């Protein structure tokens, strides 16, 4: 691990956060602002929410493919680093509409990188995914595990990783690609959370079911070689993931000649039934469970080998507890329920 003198890092230059009105991006904005970085958010609000952006950040509505807009922001705010979260992230949709993913994830990233190079931005943190590994033979995957994605979403992210490596070899820019495992939870202080309608993430779905917004939860696969037969995944709290981005940025700044690709997970896993049990404990209710056959390509277990990020940075998870992740997710979902109820009452009064 590098002995990073955090106080010595230059925070005069802003960080541009693309997709900063989305779930993970909005938490990264909070982490950056809390750490004292000037932040500019660029989001087209197709899936993001303006209300999710912390008031300490400058918000601009726009698309990363708008080169004129992006370059004006990079120059005006003297941007010294980009955190790139903008893109499409739903695996089944990537299968049914692959060109959307190659456009939103690959072509858009290419345009953003062109803008970054032309404006001399030296650092780039990229939101990648464990989907780049596909369905690996070993349940614990390291950065050296073969990357054989099995869907357009994973392939699109891997293409951007390759693009970053080539660009960094040809231009004065370094990058860190963070391969996320299963992101869940919400800001413990209630400032942000996952607000996306129709989300497919298990913990989000389960807390919605606990609050009566869904009839129940479908469990795909009960015959895996795991402790209870259901799929095991490495769930990482979104606030820990946001903090990992800060450490990645600090790592890039300390050694501009080096780039990195690192897993972001806890190195331990929980099954689908473990998660449902945790949600039931937190919500004090029963969730209807419908057992379904396995989905094609789903591995029995997928757990991060996180030794690389632990050795290269000072990142240390603060929320590595399934019950804590679920409690924060449930609290945020309850907050959304209250907001919807309040807005409904206001509309009724207006009518």
Image (cartoon, rainbow, N blue to C red):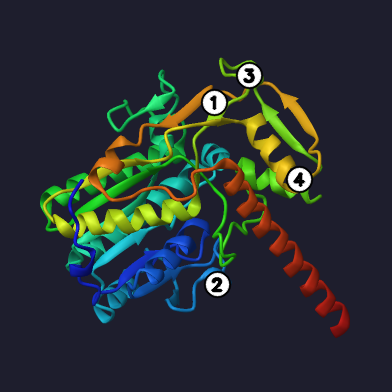
Marks 2/1: CA–CA distance: 34 Å
Marks 1/4: CA–CA distance: 23 Å
Mark 2 vs 1, N-terminal side: 2
Q: In x, y percent, where is residue 259?
A: 19, 48
**Residue in front for this viewpoint, 136 or 277:** 277
Write the residue at 54% across / 43% down.
321
The answer to whether the residues at label 3 and label 2 have Cβ atoms under 8 Å apart is no
Marks 3/2: CA–CA distance: 41 Å
Marks 4/2: CA–CA distance: 26 Å
- The numbered disc on residue 298 is 1
Residue 104 visible, this orientation = no
Secondary structure of residue under mark 3: loop
Crowdedness near tag 4: few (<14), some (14–19) or many (≥20) residues, C-alpha within 10 Å: many
Write the residue at 27% across / 38% down.
308
The residue identified by callout 2 is 50
Q: Is residue 286 above or below residue 295?
A: below
Write the residue at 24% across / 48% down.
164
Kindly report which numbered mark, 3 or 1, lies closer to the viewer in this rendering: 3
Mark 4 vs 2, N-terminal side: 2
Please tell me how many numbered marks the rendered image carries.
4
The answer to whether the residues at label 3 and label 4 have Cβ atoms under 8 Å apart is no
Q: In x, y percent, where is residue 167?
A: 18, 51
The residue identified by callout 4 is 209
Secondary structure of residue under mark 2: helix
Kindly report which numbered mark, 3 or 2, lies closer to the viewer in this rendering: 3
The residue identified by callout 3 is 229
The answer to whether the residues at label 4 and label 2 have Cβ atoms under 8 Å apart is no
Mark 3 vs 2, N-terminal side: 2
Write the residue at 17% across / 67% down.
120
Secondary structure of residue under mark 4: helix
Kindly report which numbered mark, 4 or 2, lies closer to the viewer in this rendering: 4
């Amino acid at each position: 691990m590098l002995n990073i003198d955090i106080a010595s890092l230059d925070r005069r230059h802003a960080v541009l956060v693309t997709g900063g009105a989305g779930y993970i991006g909005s938490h990264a904005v909070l982490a950056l602002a809390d750490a004292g970085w000037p932040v500019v958010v660029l989001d087209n609000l197709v899936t993001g929410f303006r209300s999710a952006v912390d008031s300490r950040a400058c918000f601009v509505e726009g698309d990363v493919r708008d080169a004129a807009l992006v370059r004006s922001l990079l120059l005006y705010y003297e941007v010294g680093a980009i955190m790139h979260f903008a893109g499409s992230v739903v695996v089944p949709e990537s299968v049914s509409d692959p060109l959307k993913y190659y456009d939103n994830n690959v072509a858009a990233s290419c345009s953003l990188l062109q803008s970054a190079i032309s404006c001399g931005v030296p650092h780039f943190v990229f939101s990648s995914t464990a989907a780049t590994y596909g369905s690996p033979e070993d349940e614990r995957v390291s950065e050296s595990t073969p990357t054989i994605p099995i869907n357009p979403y994973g392939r699109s992210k891997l293409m951007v990783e390759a693009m970053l490596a080539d660009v960094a070899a040809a231009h004065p820019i370094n990058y860190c690609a963070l391969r996320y495992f299963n992101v869940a939870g919400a800001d413990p202080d209630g400032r942000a959370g996952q607000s996306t309608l129709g989300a497919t993430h298990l913990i989000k779905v389960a807390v919605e079911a606990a609050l009566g917004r869904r009839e129940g939860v479908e469990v795909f696969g009960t015959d895996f070689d795991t402790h209870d037969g259901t799929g095991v995944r490495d769930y990482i709290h979104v606030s820990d993931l946001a903090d990992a981005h800060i450490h990645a940025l600090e790592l890039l700044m300390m050694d501009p000649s080096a780039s990195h690709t690192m897993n972001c997970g806890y190195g331990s896993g929980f099954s689908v039934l473990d998660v449902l049990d945790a949600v039931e404990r937190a919500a004090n209710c029963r969730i209807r469970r419908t057992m379904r056959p396995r989905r094609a390509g789903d591995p029995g277990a997928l757990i991060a080998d996180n030794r690389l990020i632990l050795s290269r940075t000072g990142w240390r998870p603060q929320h590595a507890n399934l019950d804590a992740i679920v409690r924060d997710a449930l609290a945020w979902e309850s907050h959304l329920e209250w907001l919807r109820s309040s807005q409904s009452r206001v509309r009724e009064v207006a009518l």
